[in-house]
Amino acid sequence: MRYALSTWLYADRPLDAALRDFKQAGFAEIEVWADKTHLDPRYLTDAAEALNLVRKSGLGVHSIHGPFHDMGIGSEDPAVIAQTEKTIMKTLEFSHELESGFVVLHPVTCDSSKISETGENYTKELFQRLADRAQQLGVGILVENLPKASAPYNSMAGLNKLFPDPRIGLCLDVAHAFLNGLDILEEIAIAAPRLYSCHVSNNDGKKDSHSNMYDGLIAMDEVLDRLAALPQVTPVLEITGSPNPEATLEGTKQSVVIRRSRAQGGKHA
Ligand SMILES: [Zn+2]
């Protein structure tokens, strides 16, 4: 089982440092973070150079995590939605240029408890237009379950219902599912036919700490065993690097080593 590592771990470092250190740590695949830093189209002064850095790294780009801060998904204001759409379209183009298979998007970027029916309908229409463009570019859109959000944004069943278009896939964030009080194995089963990515991190069930795999209350081996049975799913380690990204990366690397030895001892040898 291959693990991709999110460059969010190095959110406090430049993209080239993330690429260099991740490669040195033995990772071959990444999810490139595109919210506020690294590959966010709104903050890049030289997009071509950033894309080149990634290409030259030799790392495979499993996916790009689309922007969500200050975005208008769920808004009722057509001007805000148009601006949001422009930014995501750019992200889809980046994904195409990097031969990355997927762009992961949050299905709402406002307070999910306050979304009106109009806002929800605008969201569905927006995702249809995004799916059209993604299809042209040969990229897949994946929507992610959000922590402590309202239905339908908090579960795989909810997202299945909100986005029935088969061109839109799912990214299950296992830590978010845990915080939402859901059974992660059940969430995997519900999502399976449309699941292409999984954000993997651990927590204490209270705070979305995005800790390393074995640092928390989630029974991670059970989750990873289940994911190993779904060959189309790449687990993406989405770990907080702050305050010491280099030390955290070392812990992340160790967690993969531990997982490999445990998996070899178990049924997924
Ligand atoms: Zn996530």
Image (tube, rainbow, N blue to C red):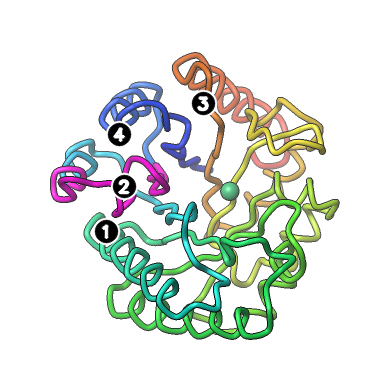
Residue type, mark 1 in image: Phe
In space, the residues marked 4 and 2 are separated at their CA atoms by 8 Å
* Left or right side of 209 for 104: left
Residue at image point 18% right, 50% down:
47
Q: Earlier in the sequence, mark 1 or mark 2?
A: 2
Q: Earlier in the sequence, mark 4 or mark 1?
A: 4
Say few, some or many: other residues with alpha carbon within 10 Å of mark 3 (under 14 / 14 to 19 / 20 or more): many
Tag of residue 69: none
Say few, some or many: other residues with alpha carbon within 10 Å of mark 1 (under 14 / 14 to 19 / 20 or more): many
Residue at image point 63% right, 35% down:
210
Q: How many marks?
A: 4
Disc 4 secondary structure class: helix
Q: Classify the position of the C terminus by image quarter.
A: top right
Q: Earlier in the sequence, mark 3 or mark 4?
A: 4
33 drawn magenta: yes
Q: Position of residue 214 (x, y in %)?
A: 70, 27
Q: Are marks 3 and 4 in contact (CB under 8 Å)?
A: no
Image: 80 above or below 4: below
Please report the bounds of the magenta region as a residue range.
30-51
Identify the residue under disc 4.
15
Identify the residue under disc 1.
94
Q: Earlier in the sequence, mark 3 or mark 2?
A: 2
Q: Earlier in the sequence, mark 4 or mark 2?
A: 4
Residue at image point 76% right, 53% down:
148
* Left or right side of 211 for 128: left
In space, the residues marked 3 and 2 are separated at their CA atoms by 17 Å
